[in-house]
Image: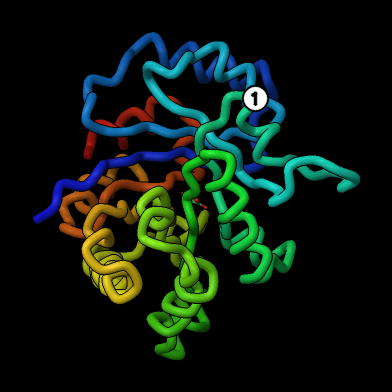
Amino acid sequence: MEQRRKIVAGNWKMHKTIPEAMEWARSFRMEPMTSGSVQVVLFPPFTALNSLVVELGSAQLELGAQDIYPGSFGAVTGEVSGAMLRDAGARWVLIGHSERRQYFNESHGLLEAKLRGALEWGLHPVYCVGESLYEREQGVHFEVVATQMKEVMGSLDEKQAERVVIAYEPVWAIGTGKTASALEAEEMHAFIRGEMAAMWGGVSGQIPILYGGSVKPSNAAQLFRCPNIDGALVGGASLDPDEFRAIVLSV
Ligand code: PGA
């Protein structure tokens, strides 16, 4: 089996002021993680991004943004471009998180543009996919995820695809305390890998697929044992440096 990168990423969503972020960073630095084989990424709010880059450097973890605007600059009030994210020290960016799809109606066309914009600026996109509870109950979850993959990533070539990380986040498991069982998650991850193989052939074996949705220190190890689960995108539990560290160390 191919050796894929292991990644544990924290998504703070709309949490933490700059002083709170600094406190997290100091606590995180005091007890360095010994697991050098895992890439750790943190997605704070835009406002705390640069202070964290300065406080943490890049030795322990890399920083990313929770969103991106596809263009470089211009009259687009309220948006932040890839150029600005690079400037602030971001190396990664989340694209297609279900909260953005749901609350801001982000379309597949827009997500594709964001993905391309991120790649142009040399950022690593983490592209999120996942079905709602209704879609799972209707038995269309594979179809939903296949569409999210094809419509947004279908036009990428192998070289571009290689730079993307996928996060499977079933919407019903996000922030609900309900995790997909390791079996359910692995089944979907294997399906996603199959879809990627159909699009890009051998390269698909190198692309990490993270699981997201109520990952905690108590369930992380079991998920990480699955052959197609290459790490996690952690929301709530990443707000506490000790919990986040425990998840990283479970890989
Ligand atoms: P959660 O969020 O870990 O709080 O469920 C995960 C996510 O939305 O990325």
Kindly tell me whether residue 184 is visible in this rendering.
no
Spot the residue most to the left: 1
- Whether residue 24 is situated above or below residue 215 in the rendered picture: above
| Residue ID at (70%, 32%) | 84
| Quarter of the view holding residue 41 | top left
- Between residue 31 and residue 115, name the one nearer to us: 115
Q: Where is residue 92 in the image (x, y as percent from the top left)?
A: 51, 39
Task: Look at the image and tell me in which quarter the N terminus lies.
Answer: bottom left
- Whether residue 246 is situated above or below residue 74 in the rendered picture: above
| Quarter of the view holding residue 211 | bottom left
Q: In the picture provided, is 225 more to the left or to the right than 130?
A: left
Q: Is mark 1 within 8 Å of ligand 1?
A: no
Circle 1: element type: helix
Kindly tell me whether residue 21 is visible in this rendering.
yes
Crowding at mark 1 (Cα within 10 Å: few <14, some 14-19, many 20+): many
- Whether residue 137 is situated above or below residue 106 in the rendered picture: below
Q: In the picture provided, is 26 more to the left or to the right than 168?
A: right
- Between residue 123 and residue 101, name the one nearer to us: 123
The residue wearing badge 1 is 88
Disc 1 marks a residue whose amino acid type is Ala
| Residue ID at (56%, 30%) | 90
Q: Where is residue 209 in the image (x, y as percent from the top left)?
A: 33, 56
| Residue ID at (37%, 32%) | 40
| Residue ID at (22%, 20%) | 34
| Quarter of the view holding residue 44 | top right
Q: In the picture provided, is 29 more to the left or to the right than 114?
A: left
Q: Position of residue 125 (x, y in %)?
A: 49, 48
- Between residue 169 and residue 126, name the one nearer to us: 126
